[in-house]
Image (cartoon, rainbow, N blue to C red):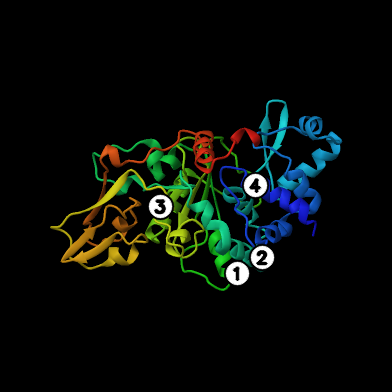
Amino acid sequence: MDQNAYQRLATRLDALPDGFPPTQDGSELRLLAKLFTPEEADLAAQLRLTLETPAQLAERIGGDAKVLRKQLKAMAKRGLIAVGRAEEGLGYGLLPFVVGIYEMQNETLDEELARLFEDYYQQAFTQALEVQPQVHRVVPIGETVQAGMEIRPFESASEIVNRSQSWGVIDCICRKQKALIGDPCDHPLDVCMVLSDYPGAFDGSHDVRVLTREEALATLRRAAEAGLVHSVSNNRQGTWYICNCCTCACGILRGMAEMGIANVVARSAFVNQVHEDLCTGCGVCVELCQFGALSVAGVAQVDSMRCVGCGVCTFACPQGALYLVRRPEEEILSVPPTQMDWRIERAAARGLDLGEVL
C-alpha cells in the first residue's frame, strides 16, 4: 500500500467541512485503500470541491488532459469523485467521504468494506458528528403537523418530495453495512430516497429504482409507518436525498445511541404535543421514540428538549393523541440556505480555510 498517497487523500478529505478525522491505527487509510488505487488516491487528493474539466485540471496540476479524462471518468463511475456540468464542459471534483464517497458504494459494499468502515466509525467518525451545524436535519411528513400550523417547504418531507421533478429509491447502505458485520435490524432496506430538480434524472441508472411522485410519497409513508426518522441535508435548497433512519443502523443516529452525542442531528421546527383527553397511556409511542423524548405518567409526557419533531410517534398512536406543533420562533434552529452556506458555517466551526479546497 502506498501509504503516502492514501495519507494525502485522507488529509485532503479532512480539510473539507464535512471532515474525515484520522485514527491512531490508520483505519482511515485501510478504508481508502479498499476503494482507491494509489494512483487514484493521488489524483483525488489534488481535486477541489469546485468542478474542473480535465483540461483545466491538466493546466493546474500537469499531465495529459486525455489521460486525466479517462482516469476521472472511471473514478466517477465508481462513485469516488463528483461529476457534473461545469462552465466549460463536464467537470470533476472532490467528494466528501460522508455524505459522498461511502454512500456511493452501495453496489460494491461487501463484508470487508463493511468491517473496515465499522473500524473507522468506532474510532474516529464521532468527531465529525460532534461539529455543528450538523450533517443532517430532521423533517416530519407534513400531515403529522397540527392543521393550521405554518410549514415552510424545506420543513416538510412530503413537500420536499412534491417540489422535486425526479424520484428514486435505493437500499439503505447503513442497514446493509450492519447486516454484513452480523448485526442486522428489522427495518425495511429499500427506503433510501434520492431526488432531483430535473425530470428524468434517474432514467437509465443501474442502481436507482425510478419512482413516480405518488410512489415516492408512498415510500415516505411506508418508512414512517415502520418507525423511521426522515432526515435530509442541513440546508434549505437543493435537497437531493431523504434518509429514513434508525438508531440501530444509521451512521448519524448511532452517534446518539452508541456514543451519547445529544445533538447529533438538527431537530425540526416542530415539537410533539399530547391530547390528554385522547391518550390512554398505552406506551406505544414510548417504544417507538428513538430519542427518549416520551414517557408515560397516566398519559404520555413529552420532553421537549429531547424531542426532535420527527412525527414518527403520531403514526403509531392508536388513539390519535399525538401531534406536532411549531416551536416558539426563538427555539427554531437556523437552517443554512444552501450547501455552500452550510460549508462556510461548518468550516468556520472547524477552523478551516475553505478557500484551500474550493
The residue that appears at 45% across and 36% down in the rendered structure is: 336
Q: Amino acid at mark 2?
A: Asp
C-alpha distance separating marks 3 and 2: 31 Å
Which amino acid, by three-letter code, is at mark 4? Leu
Callout 4: SS: helix
Q: Which residue is mark 1?
A: 180
Say which residue label 2 marks. 110
Q: Earlier in the sequence, mark 3 or mark 2?
A: 2
- Under mark 3, the amino acid is Asn
Of the 4 image quadrants, the one containing the C terminus is top right
Residue to which mark 4 is pinned: 13
| Dot 2 crowding, Cα within 10 Å, few <14, some 14–19, many 20+ | some
Asked if the residue at tag 2 contacts the one at tag 1, i.e. Cβ–Cβ closer than 8 Å, the answer is yes
Between residues 162 and 34, which one lies in front from this camera angle? 34
Q: Quadrant of the N terminus?
A: bottom right
N-terminal of the pair, mark 3 or mark 1, is 1
Q: Can you tell which quarter of the image residue 116 is in? A: bottom right
- Depth order, front residue of 333/286: 333
Residue that mark 3 sits on = 263
Query: Count of labels shown?
Result: 4
Camera-near label (3 vs 2) is: 3
Q: Position of residue 226 (x, y in %)?
A: 40, 61
The Cα–Cα distance between marks 1 and 4, rounded to whole angstroms, is 26 Å
The quarter of the displayed image where residue 289 is located = bottom left
